[in-house]
Amino acid sequence: MGKITVAGKKIELDEEGFLLHQEDWDCEVAKELAKQAGIDPLDEEQFEIIQFMREYYKKFSSFPILNYVCKHIDQPKQCINKEFINPMNAWKIAGLPRLDGVRFVTMDGKNYIMEDYPG
């Protein structure tokens, strides 16, 4: 388990860098999580993606279909892959919980699909 400090507040992370407490998330925490993922600065399009993911998770308690995110926020198809490389980075920066039994796989390093896996 790790920690980051944002605006003088210690934020707990799990061993993969996901927030342990979703209520700790705010824009400054998102910027720090993005920086740790090698995304600095976090731009407006990226922030729009993570805000939508947060809203979707709050409503449905699940990960949205990637192309649905892009279409809904009027960004080009594959916007998540373009902006974050791996969709799990966007999920992590959005401060959402680790998805047990789910991972993203790619054959070309550009296009990801979500698949279930045991463990």
Image: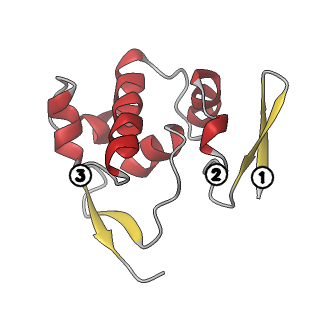
From this viewpoint, is residue 85 visible? no
Closer to the camera in the image, 23 or 39: 23
Residue 93: x %, y % from top left: 52, 38
Q: Nearer the viewer, mark 3 or mark 2?
A: 2
Q: Compare marks 1 and 2 and give the one earlier in the sequence.
A: 1
Name the residue rendered at 57%, 22% in the picture. 27
Could you say which disc has been placed on residue 17 in the image? 2
Q: Compare marks 1 and 3 and give the one earlier in the sequence.
A: 1
Question: Could you tell me the amino acid type at mark 1?
Answer: Gly
User: According to the image, what is the colour scheme of the structure?
Assistant: secondary structure
Q: Residue furthest front?
A: 59
Dot 1 and dot 2 residues touching (CB under 8 Å)? yes
Q: Compare marks 3 and 2 and give the one earlier in the sequence.
A: 2
Closer to the camera in the image, 9 or 31: 9
Q: Relative to 103, is 57 above or below? A: above
Q: Relative to 10, is 117 above or below? A: below
Question: Could you tell me the amino acid type at mark 2?
Answer: Gly
Q: How many marks?
A: 3
SS class, disc 3: loop
Question: Could you tell me the amino acid type at mark 3?
Answer: Asn
From this viewpoint, is residue 30 visible? yes
SS class, disc 2: loop
Label 1, label 3: how many angstroms apart (C-alpha)? Answer: 30 Å
Q: Which residue is mark 3?
A: 111
Q: Relative to 64, is 1 above or below? A: below
Name the residue rendered at 85%, 24% in the picture. 8
Label 1, label 2: how many angstroms apart (C-alpha)? Answer: 7 Å
Residue 73: x %, y % from top left: 22, 25
53 vs 1, left or right, is left
Name the residue rendered at 56%, 41% in the picture. 37
Could you say which disc has been placed on residue 2 in the image? 1
